[in-house]
Each structure stands twice: as structure tokens, then as C-alpha cells.
Amino acid sequence: MTALDWTPNHGLPYEPVPYRPERMPADESLANAADLRRRMGERRTVRMFSSDPVPEQAVFDAIAVASTAPSGAHQQPWTFVLVTDPEVRRRVREAAEAEEQVSYEGRLGEQWLEALRPLGTDAVKPHLTDSPYLIIVFQQRFFLEDDGSIRKHYYVDESVGIAVGMLLTALHLAGLAALTHTPSPMRFLGEMLGRPRNEKAFAVIPVGYPADDCVVPNLHRKSLDQVLVRI
Ligand code: IYR
């Protein structure tokens, strides 16, 4: 990874430049929006992966899409660690499963376990070693200058959350399955992957094709009128 200044714009002053994208005709807007709605309606969180390889450039492209997300003060406070090394993955799985074991055996509490029941999840996480790729997303809580001093980053949770949403969308539209996995606590990831002290693990995202015998829970989504309020 190349070194960055504290902001990708190097602290330069405001410089307005023209932005005049060609306006999309309404029928094209409607067709695109309806098509995207249909395609995204087909996205499912997958926990059973094939180990078949996927086109690597599609994964790079999806990460590049994620990095176009809007962010607080345009600080782009994210790092995507792409892990394929089987030994590193074995260690990540071992540590994640150890934490999950404690969680499922009681740390989560009865109400949380009850909320998870329809998902059919447990402490065994084969996707951490089975999928061809693991994207571990880190949030940069602050910028670390070369001399060790710190510059604040703004709206880090929101920015990284938006970027991960765009990553999941891009992966799905490229025909790839993913899982938003948040082993808790995740501190072991920063240590294991040698990340600097300004970075905090945000999500672990296995990427690949669903296994031939993949199943997903029969979940239903809220309808538009359940989530949309018009005033
Ligand atoms: N992190 C655990 C538990 C878990 C929590 C939520 I909230 C989920 O939506 C799914 C799982 C796990 O990965 O199993």
C-alpha cells in the first residue's frame, strides 16, 4: 500500500471544478432502477462457500468501488486486507471460532441468541477457510503521522459502513457471494494481520461462489411500505 497524506487531497484549499454529467432520460432511469432493485433482491448472505477460484480482478474492482464511497471530510478511513494465505486463514479461523464459542455458550445472552435462531448460525466458521478470498475491512480510527502524532478522522463508522454496503453490492453484481461476518471481539485480527494501531477491524467478508449444496435461511425482507415514510 502506498503512503498517504492525512487527507487524499493533501489539505489543499477548496477548488470547485465543473460536474455536469449528462442527464439520464427518465425511461432509462426507471429501467436501471427497477433492474437494480430486482438484482439486489436476489442477494443473499452466504455461509457455505465453494473453494472454486473466482476472477481476481472482479474482487479488486469491487474493492475499488467500495473506496468510491463518500466519507467524512473525504478522508476515506478504510483499509481492505485481502487474505488468501491458507496458514493466515487457518489462524484467523481458529481465533474467531474460539471467540464465537464463548459467545454462543453464553456471552451473547439469551435475547441475542433468540434473535439469531432463525439464521441457524453457530460457532463453527468454515467460510473463513473455504472461500477463495477473505476481505478484512479495517477502519482507520485516526490518521497516524510518520512522527507518531495523530489527526482525527470524522464519521468513521458511517463512512466505513457505507463503503462496506457498496462493496457487498459490487460483489453481488459481479456474481460473487459474500458474508458480513463480525467475530466479536475482533481485536485479534489487527494483531494477527500486523495492522497499525490506528486501524480497528470492522468486518470479515468471505467472498466466493456458493457451495454446490449451499442453503440459506428462509428469511423475508420488509416491504417498501414498511420501511418508507413519506411526509
Ligand atoms: N458474530 C456471531 C453472531 C452473530 C451475530 C449477528 I447480530 C448476526 O447477524 C449473525 C451472527 C457469528 O458470526 O456467528
Image (cartoon, rainbow, N blue to C red):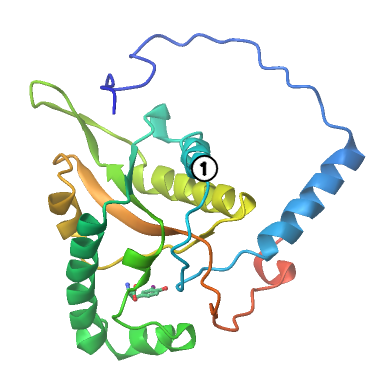
The structure residue drawn at horizontal position 26% and vertical position 52%, both measured from the top left corner, is: 85
Q: Judge whether 109 appears above or below 192 on screen.
A: below
Residue 136 x %, y %? 32, 51
Q: Judge whether 119 appears above or below 9 on screen.
A: below
| 133 displayed left or right of 183 | right
Residue that lies at the very extreme toward the left in this rendered image: 147
Q: Is mark 1 within 8 Å of ligand 1?
A: no
Nearest the eye: 102 or 171: 171
Q: Quadrant of the C terminus?
A: bottom right
The structure residue drawn at horizontal position 39% and vertical position 82%, both measured from the top left corner, is: 121
The structure residue drawn at horizontal position 29% and vertical position 29%, both measured from the top left corner, is: 1
Total number of numbered labels? Answer: 1
Q: Judge whether 123 appears above or below 135 on screen.
A: below
| 213 displayed left or right of 189 | right
For the residue marked with disc 1, what is the amino acid?
Ala
Q: Which residue is mark 1?
A: 62
Ligand 1 lies in quarter = bottom left
Q: Is residue 143 visible?
A: yes
Considering the numbered disc 1 on the image, is that residue within a helix, a strand or a loop? Answer: helix
Q: Dot 1, crowdedness within 10 Å: few (<14), some or many (≥20)?
A: many
Q: Quarter-wise, where is residue 74 in the image?
A: top left
The structure residue drawn at horizontal position 34% and vertical position 58%, both measured from the top left corner, is: 204
Nearest the eye: 105 or 123: 123
Q: Is residue 231 visible?
A: no
